[in-house]
């Protein structure tokens, strides 16, 4: 298959692919899987519905031919998927891929970090929304303290994986943790990325008033740290970066709410059951799994993806407050990862 670059209706190329490998998680985070909505009776996908590793590998090859350079594995919690290093090894060998990462809550990293690194994983993004055990236990909905996550971060570093820390900031919940998290990550040489609380899915009860903007976070940091801006590393880089003056340690902001970046969004998402989503806030997935299972050739699958991408016009964050978006159906984050 000849390599080609495809563009959507707003001229944005396809560059990044996020693949959810499982919809289950061992946490019940307030932001994406609140326990009142995802209780013991919640029906997760049966194993047969999940894309197999062979299917994921086949799709990854096709996406790379269509311009994808970066793949990130997500969940649910991706480390709950059995034998994940087997998939990592398959993907890491694909020609044309420049980055292979994983987003995780970190709890299973002490057991798996070395195997993941050996299989070819380059880096992990670990979610940690507070350093306070009680607050963190409340946020993750399972009463788990920070210890297992911090051990996971350490294990990933020891294994030689790149590590970034993701912190979703919600007003009145964990905004008091903004400065302590920065101090901790700076001391450990970890890049911390503050993520504005978003209206993903329909289960987290999002309100605009709960958002702490980049500007507000920056104001909190300014009294404690000297920060200098860092130029974007490439077109479509999502985080806006700063560096602690006199160090190489960066801090990033994901400003989906206050400074949307749809005009340079090059990201597509595959759900665990093989539906393709062209925006984190678009509730309509396009079936790829059944199309493949019904015998479509690589060329046919590729053409389907091209058609979907060519028709893409998503720019939800630019239009978040528009009246037409008030009752919009959105996909749950646990289904396609962040
Ligand atoms: S709202 Fe959708 S189109 Fe805009 S940046 Fe986010 S994922 Fe991309």
Image (tube, rainbow, N blue to C red):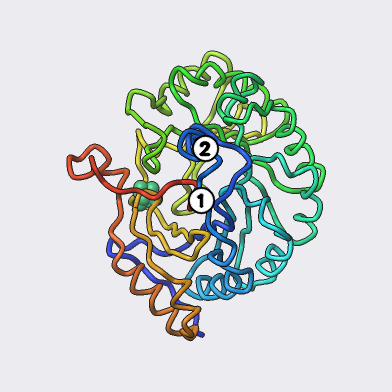
Along the horizontal axis of the image, is 37 left or right of 133?
left
Query: Which residue occupies 68% across, 65% down?
Result: 87
166 is higher (above) or lower (below) than 285? above
Residue at far left of view: 323
- The response on whether ligand 1 sits within 8 Å of label 1 is no
Crowd band around label 2 with a 10 angstrom C-alpha radius: few (<14), some (14–19), many (20+)? many
Along the horizontal axis of the image, is 106 left or right of 294?
right
Crowd band around label 1 with a 10 angstrom C-alpha radius: few (<14), some (14–19), many (20+)? few
Q: Which residue is mark 1?
A: 43
Question: Picture coordinates of residue 74 (x, y %)?
Answer: 57, 52
Query: Which residue occupies 66% across, 47% down?
Result: 124
How many numbered discs?
2
Question: Picture coordinates of residue 277 (x, y %)?
Answer: 40, 59
Query: Which residue occupies 39% across, 50% down?
Result: 331
Q: Which residue is mark 2?
A: 241
249 is higher (above) or lower (below) than 131? below
Element under disc 2: strand
Q: CA distance from mark 2 to mark 1?
A: 39 Å
Q: Nearer the viewer, mark 2 or mark 1?
A: 1
Q: Nearer the viewer, residue 275 or 255?
A: 275
Residue at far top of view: 223
């Amino acid at each position: 298959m000849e390599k080609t670059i495809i563009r959507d209706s707003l001229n944005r190329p396809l560059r990044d692919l996020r693949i959810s490998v499982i919809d289950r998680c061992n946490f019940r985070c307030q932001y994406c899987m609140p326990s009142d909505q995802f209780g013991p009776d919640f029906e997760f996908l049966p194993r047969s519905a999940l894309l197999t590793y062979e299917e994921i590998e086949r799709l990854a090859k096709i996406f790379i031919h269509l311009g994808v350079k970066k793949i990130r594995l997500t969940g649910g919690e991706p480390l709950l998927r059995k034998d994940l290093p087997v998939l990592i090894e398959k993907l890491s060998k694909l020609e044309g891929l420049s980055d292979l990462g994983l987003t995780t809550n970190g709890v299973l990293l002490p057991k798996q970090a070395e195997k993941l690194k050996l299989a070819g994983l380059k880096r992990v993004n670990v979610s940690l929304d507070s350093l306070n055990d009680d607050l963190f236990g409340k946020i993750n909905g399972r009463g788990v303290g920070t210890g297992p996550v911090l051990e996971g971060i350490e294990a990933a570093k020891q294994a030689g994986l790149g590590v970034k820390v993701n912190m979703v900031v919600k007003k009145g919940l964990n905004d008091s943790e903004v400065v302590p998290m920065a101090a901790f990550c700076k001391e450990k040489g970890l890049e911390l990325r503050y993520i504005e609380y978003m209206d993903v899915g329909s289960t987290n009860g999002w309100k605009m008033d709960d958002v702490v903007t980049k500007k507000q976070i920056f104001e909190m940091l300014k009294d404690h740290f000297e920060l200098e801006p860092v130029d974007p590393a490439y077109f479509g880089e999502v985080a806006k970066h700063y560096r602690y003056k006199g160090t190489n340690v960066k801090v990033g902001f994901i400003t989906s709410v206050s400074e949307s970046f749809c005009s340079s969004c090059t990201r597509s998402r595959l759900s665990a059951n093989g539906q393709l989503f062209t925006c984190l806030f678009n509730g309509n997935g396009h079936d790829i799994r059944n199309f493949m299972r019904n015998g479509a050739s690589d060329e046919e699958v590729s053409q389907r993806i091209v058609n979907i991408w060519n028709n893409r016009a998503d720019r939800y964050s630019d239009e978040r407050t528009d009246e037409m978006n008030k009752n919009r159906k959105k996909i749950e984050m646990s289904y396609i990862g962040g």
